[in-house]
Image (tube, grey):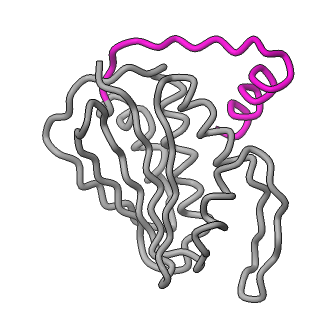
Amino acid sequence: GVVGELRDLIHYELQRDLVLRVEPTTMEEAIEQIKDSLQAGADFNIEWRLPAKLPKILADPDRLSRCIASLLFHARKFRSSGGISVDAAAAQGRVELGIEYLGPKLSFSEAKSSLNLYYPAYRRNNQLLCAVGMGLGAIKDVLRLQGGDLDFRVDSEGHSALILYIPMA
């Protein structure tokens, strides 16, 4: 995951030669590639609430799987308690994958800033970990190169949602 993201970041930001293999695939295939490795020895529970069938999407299958895995690891790292839930739906010409967890309380601007490729890390009084925004920012950039996007929403209680958007084929 992290090594692949750093390699992509170097090719995208520095060398300007990142090659994507965008093709028709399914969200189910992307998730199946990572599902077993995520649950093996995990100290958290993932509740998969996926519909029986989703439409085909246009994405680079390997990078999409890596993006989903990285978002789940982000949720694991920053969750304050409880499990993680994953749901998906088709809407407005795209498939939306939502990853929800209880995390730190962030303002609207803090949540949006964390999607920037580079942003400074500020340690909060109630926070053990602080992170540079490269992780979510790199994922967002790779998704945008595939015609997709990433959003991050946090309510006043810390209920967090990472929402990945991928265009339908």
Q: Is residue 1 left or right of residue 68?
A: right
Could you tell me residue 135's position as x and y percent?
A: 69, 47
Can you give x and y, in whole percent of width and height, for residue 21 in the image?
A: 52, 11
Image side of residue 89 versus residue 79, left or right: left
- Which quadrant of the figure has residue 108? bottom right
Measured from the top left, where is residue 147 in percent x and y? Answer: 47, 25
- Residue at image position (41%, 63%) is 100
Q: Quadrant of the N terminus?
A: top right
Boundaries of the magenta span: 1-26
Residue at x 25%, y 36% (from the top left corner): 92
Question: Residue 22 lies in magenta, yes or no?
Answer: yes
Residue drawn at the location 70% of the way across and 15% of the way down:
18
Can you name the residue that lies furthest to the bottom here?
125
Is 161 magenta? The answer is no
**Would you place residue 2 above or below residue 57 in this image?**
below
Q: Residue at x 55, y 63 (%)?
A: 76
Query: Looking at this rendering, what residue extends furthest in the left direction?
Result: 52
Picture coordinates of residue 80, whole percent (x, y): 55, 79
Q: Nearer the viewer, residue 73 or 127?
A: 127
Relative to the observer, which residue lies in front, 132 or 63?
Answer: 132
Nearer to us in this view, 129 or 123: 123
Q: Quadrant of the C terminus?
A: top left
Where 18 sits versus 167, above or below?
A: above
Q: Is residue 38 above or below residue 64?
A: below
User: In the image, is 92 to the left or to the right of 81?
Assistant: left
The tally of labels here is 0
